[in-house]
Image (cartoon, grey):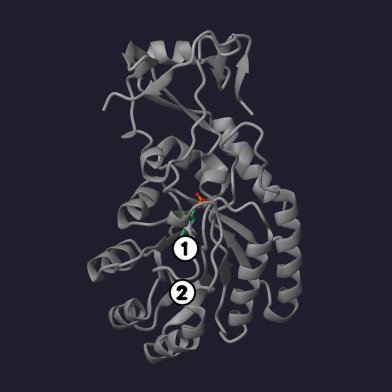
Amino acid sequence: MVIEVRGPHLYVGGLRAEDIADRFGTPLFAYDRETVEENYGKLVGSFTYENVEILYSCKANNNPGILSALRELGAGLDASSPWEVLLGVRLGFPRERILFTGVGVADEEMRFVRGELGVLVNVDSLPQLRRYGRMFPGTEVSIRINPGFGAGYHEFTTTGGLTKFGIDVSSASRALEIAGEHGLRVVGLHAHIGSGIFSVEPYARVARVLLELARKIPHVEFIDVGGGMGVPYRPGEGAFDHIGFGRTMSKIMEEYSRTLGNVKLRLEPGRFIVGNAGVLLTRVVDVKEVEVGGIRKVFAVVDSSVNHIPRAAMMGTYYEVVHASRAGAPAEVEVDVVGNL
Ligand SMILES: Cc1ncc(COP(=O)(O)O)c(C=O)c1O
């Protein structure tokens, strides 16, 4: 990992965090490209099944430098808005390696993504499939399935089970009928059931649901088991077992490929690729001491806030705070680090 504490200093990509802050000002997001590349390589390298493609989920971080680095490694893109699709196209991602997955997708958005940009749409509901079929009869489509169960670290990011996401697996046959009525070729089956998943088992279940469904469809080229591979947020937290994941998923794909042919396995990791690859550098602008009712508190007010890390406000998520210029030094005083909003 190339974000590390050496002596009293925090280093990002071999540079002292304080030097980066001095050069570019704060608040500042600083990313380490090597870490991004390493994470991508770890996931790809864990598979023995050869037909695997990673669509980086760019909602995790759409910094163009990060996207370009991943494109150069051969990644595709999981895009969740027409804008993200356009960003991918402009940055040179091959259109056939971009998949647009949305909820509540309007006709004009499909017209733009499919009609103008030529990117595959991953349809989220039966009504959307009907609308898509009327607009683009005889073309290709991918279908997002809700396998009936979710997984992950937070109810806000659980997207399987009783949620608004995808076409309920029990309605899959109806989806295939609708596709048939419009001459649509279902080339992909997709599911993303949550984020912050540390166990391999939910992915194996999802893959089997999709592969069983694939048996009923003559044109399926890929199944996509989504993202959600967990990353540690607190020191000492365990990591996602990418080796076990690659081994189990390869076994399943190899097993089914004997009867289904060489179906591609797609993955949509977001935070697994970028979660440990960046820091938000912020400076202490003010130190305030407050005493009320005999209780004293010290606040270190920094030049950033929840506008830069909204997940902290929305979901109470944890971010490790490191004193970049005295990282290794013993603590002298306990402070609350607070933002400037
Ligand atoms: C459809 C889809 N794919 C992939 C992801 C990536 O999730 P993560 O960053 O947890 O890997 C998300 C996250 O919301 C998603 O909605």
- The percent position of residue 278, horizontal first and vertical second, equals 50, 30
- The percent position of residue 307, horizontal first and vertical second, equals 31, 34
Q: Is residue 25 visible?
A: no
User: Could you say whether the residue bearing mark 2 is in a helix, strand or loop?
Assistant: strand
User: Could you say whether the residue bearing mark 1 is in a helix, strand or loop?
Assistant: loop
Say which of 323 and 334 sits in front: 334
**Vertical position of residue 39 compared to residue 162: above or below:** above
**Vertical position of residue 241 compared to residue 128: above or below:** above
Q: In the displayed orientation, state which residue is furthest to the front.
A: 293
Mark 1 vs ligand 1: CB below 8 Å: yes
Q: In the displayed orientation, state which residue is furthest to the left.
A: 108
Which residue corresponds to mark 2? 143
**Vertical position of residue 234 compared to residue 244: above or below:** above
Q: Earlier in the sequence, mark 1 or mark 2?
A: 2
Which residue corresponds to mark 1? 159
Which image quarter holds the C terminus? top left
For image coordinates 70% across by 68% down, the residue present is 253
Say which of 328 and 247 sits in front: 328
Mark 1 Cα-neighbour bin, 10 Å: few <14, some 14–19, many ≥20: many
For image coordinates 38% across by 35% down, the residue present is 309
Mark 2 Cα-neighbour bin, 10 Å: few <14, some 14–19, many ≥20: many
C-beta proximity under 8 Å, tags 1 and 2: no
**Vertical position of residue 34 compared to residue 328: above or below:** below
Residue 151 falls in which quadrant of the image? Answer: bottom right
Q: Is residue 6 visible?
A: yes
Residue 95 falls in which quadrant of the image? Answer: bottom left
Say which of 55 and 160 sits in front: 160
Which image quarter holds the N terminus? top right
- The percent position of residue 193, horizontal first and vertical second, equals 52, 63
Quote the CA–CA distance across marks 1 and 2: 15 Å
- The percent position of residue 21, horizontal first and vertical second, equals 41, 15
